[in-house]
Image: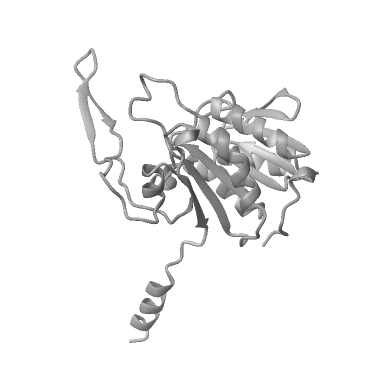
């Protein structure tokens, strides 16, 4: 566990994301972090890397560009960005805390396994640095309307202060999702578990101008209601969802069952 409470005023914070260095959510998170911490660094993908998961670039060179004071872009994935920050850009003074986001769109349920936003926090956790991932759910009509970031802007600092006031295990990261409502309509902050919502069940088929077929993976199917206590239910009910996630994927009950099976 890291030493808690974390003294944010004396901390060095690293920010990354998967929407890219110029993403509006990242700019908002950077502004919030600068009000909390002594020093803020940004190392983010040069271009959008949504749904890249915890992928690492191994078969092509990475290029790092300095684009401002303590601000760098990397032509790779969120995982690449955190790894480059830890082992190159900030190797002499590693961060005390890593923040990822604020992602445009939620990362709840099974979304987490695809998420580059979560992956950046996972990579930091592997370096034994406390990490928090932030995502802003967007309205279904987001293509036609402007994203309302007010919930994220209003509650991000409070969440950072609260979660860093206590210690959590080195193999745990914190996943935060903001509901798609104005700040005045947020119903509270809930500590939640991972819900279930499958993406990719809808495959859209069409043809290009030459008549060749192509396929587009559709969005996840939303339910009218989700089980209480889950991240999905929280944001559906207008609350901020805070979910601790473990990097240890071992299912210990099945492990014990298999040990018994192999004794026979």
Percent position of residue 157, x then y: 63, 40
Q: Is residue 230 toward the left or the right of residue 17 in the image?
A: left
State the residue in front, 96 or 87. 96
Residue 107 showing in the rendered view: yes
Q: Is residue 198 toward the left or the right of residue 130 in the image?
A: left
User: What residue is drawn where x is 20% and y is 28%?
Assistant: 205
Percent position of residue 103, x then y: 50, 34
Relative to residue 144, is residue 13 depicted above or below? below
Q: Is residue 57 toward the left or the right of residue 108 in the image?
A: right
State the residue in front, 140 or 173. 140
Q: Is residue 83 toward the left or the right of residue 182 in the image?
A: right
Q: Which part of the image, by quadrant, shows the N terminus?
A: bottom right
Percent position of residue 78, x then y: 56, 38
User: What residue is drawn where x is 33% and y is 87%?
Assistant: 264
Residue 77 picture quarter: top right
Percent position of residue 45, x then y: 58, 30
């Amino acid at each position: 566990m890291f030493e808690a409470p974390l003294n944010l005023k004396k901390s060095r914070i690293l920010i990354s994301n998967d929407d890219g260095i110029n993403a509006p959510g990242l700019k908002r998170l950077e502004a919030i972090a600068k009000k909390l911490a002594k020093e803020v660094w940004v190392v983010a993908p040069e271009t959008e890397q949504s749904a890249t998961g915890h992928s690492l670039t191994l078969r092509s060179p990475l290029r790092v560009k300095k684009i401002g004071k303590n601000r760098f872009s990397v032509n790779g994935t969120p995982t690449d960005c955190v790894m480059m920050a830890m082992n190159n850009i900030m190797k002499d003074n590693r961060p005390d805390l890593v923040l990822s986001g604020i992602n445009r769109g939620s990362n709840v349920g099974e979304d987490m396994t695809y998420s580059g936003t979560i992956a950046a926090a996972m990579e930091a956790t592997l370096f034994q640095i406390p990490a928090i991932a932030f995502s802003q759910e967007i309205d279904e009509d987001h293509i036609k309307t402007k994203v309302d970031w007010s919930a994220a802007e209003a509650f991000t600092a409070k969440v950072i202060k609260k979660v860093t006031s206590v210690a959590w295990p080195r193999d745990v990261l914190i996943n935060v999702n903001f509901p798609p409502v104005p700040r005045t309509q947020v119903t509270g902050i809930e500590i939640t578990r991972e819900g279930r919502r499958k993406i990719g069940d809808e495959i859209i088929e069409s043809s290009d101008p030459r008549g060749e077929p192509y396929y587009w993976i559709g969005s996840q199917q939303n339910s009218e209601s989700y089980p209480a206590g889950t991240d999905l239910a929280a944001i559906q009910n207008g609350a901020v969802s805070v979910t601790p996630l473990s990097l240890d994927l071992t299912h210990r009950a099945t492990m014990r069952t298999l040990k018994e099976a192999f004794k026979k």
